[in-house]
Amino acid sequence: MSEKTPLTSEATPLRHVAFIMDGNGRWAKKRGMPREYGHTFGVKAFRAIVEHCGKLGLEAATFYAFSTENWKRPPREVNAIMKLMDTYLAECEKKLDQYAFRLVFLGDKSVFDEKRRAKMERLEELTKDRSRILNIALNYGGRSEIVTACNRLLAKGKESVTEADFNAALYTAESPEPDLIIRTGGDLRISNFLLWQAAYAELYFTDTLWPDFGPADLDIAIDEFNKRKRRFGGV
Ligand code: FPP
């Protein structure tokens, strides 16, 4: 994430874009290939979009890579996604200086084996002084995040909390609220993603399947965002 191109108007400041990367399976099926093939190309699209988010000067970008519900998929597919993730983590570590962003993993890491968890935590630690954030939601669920936040606050002995306390207890504590949430793949729902944080986010849905979603598509979504009037409950 390097050059900064101003992309926001005063009326619609854009600091944080979040992505529900849907449609990998259908993209593969259309080509007569197994679902894992779609995920491999999904990672290619992910890389291109991360790079573009960097060029656009966003403060934060969030990607829904694996939900708490995705464990229900066939083991072969789950293993393929985890393998892609491991490859990406290894690459991030190797090219740490080329990536200007802070890596944050949203979700419950306790389910991962020691090696993967240690790698995620090491990357978070090594990049923690960087200001712009790349959130990767992995074993993430919005409801589970809210319950985890409640338990964190209870463990601190809190008896009543403010919204600021609550924000600080979420996995996304370090990020601004998402301004724009983009879902590819044609479904019109948010599927347990950033439930608390999405309160005032603009939602953008496209039929484009994730592996086909490129920087030009993100620019179109941002143009649409810039046309919207955000009132945050005001008039
Ligand atoms: C949704 O498509 C996609 C996922 C559940 C996984 C997304 C994961 C990646 C793009 C790889 C993540 C890895 C990194 C390194 C970020 P789907 O399988 O539900 O597609 P469908 O709706 O067509 O079946």
Image (cartoon, helix red, strand yellow):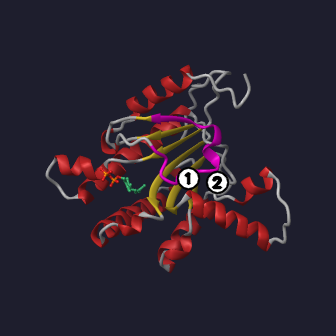
Q: Secondary structure at mark 2?
A: loop
Q: Nearer the viewer, residue 43 or 179?
A: 179
Residue 62, given in percent of the width and then of the height, sits at 53, 48
Percent coordinates x, y for residue 123 in the rendering: 56, 63
Inspect the image, locate mark 1, and give the three-letter code of the amino acid beneath it: Asn
- First in residue order: circle 1 vs circle 2: 1
Q: Residue at x 78, y 73 (%)?
A: 155
Magenta segment: 189-204
Q: Residue furthest left?
A: 32
Point 24% across, 56% down: residue? 37
Label 2 crowd (10 A; few <14 / some 14-19 / many >=20): many
**Residue 10 shown left or right of residue 37 in the figure:** right
Instruction: Please check the rendered image and state whether residue 229 is part of the magenta-colored stretch, yes or no.
Output: no
Q: Residue at x 46, y 37 (%)?
A: 52
Percent across and percent down for residue 149 are 69, 63
Is 102 above or below relative to 182?
A: below
Q: Which mark is residue 162?
A: none
213 left or right of 150? left
- Residue matched to label 1: 135
Q: CA distance from mark 1 to mark 2?
A: 8 Å
Front one among 202 and 105: 202
- Quadrant of picture, ligand 1: bottom left
Q: Which residue is mark 2?
A: 172
Evaluate if marks 1 and 2 touch, with contact meaning CB atoms under 8 Å apart: yes
Some atom of ligand 1 lies within 8 Å of the CB belonging to the residue at label 1: no
Residue 19 or residue 206, whichever sits in front: 206
Quarter of the image with the N terminus is top right
Q: Quadrant of the C terminus?
A: top right
Front disc: 1 or 2: 2
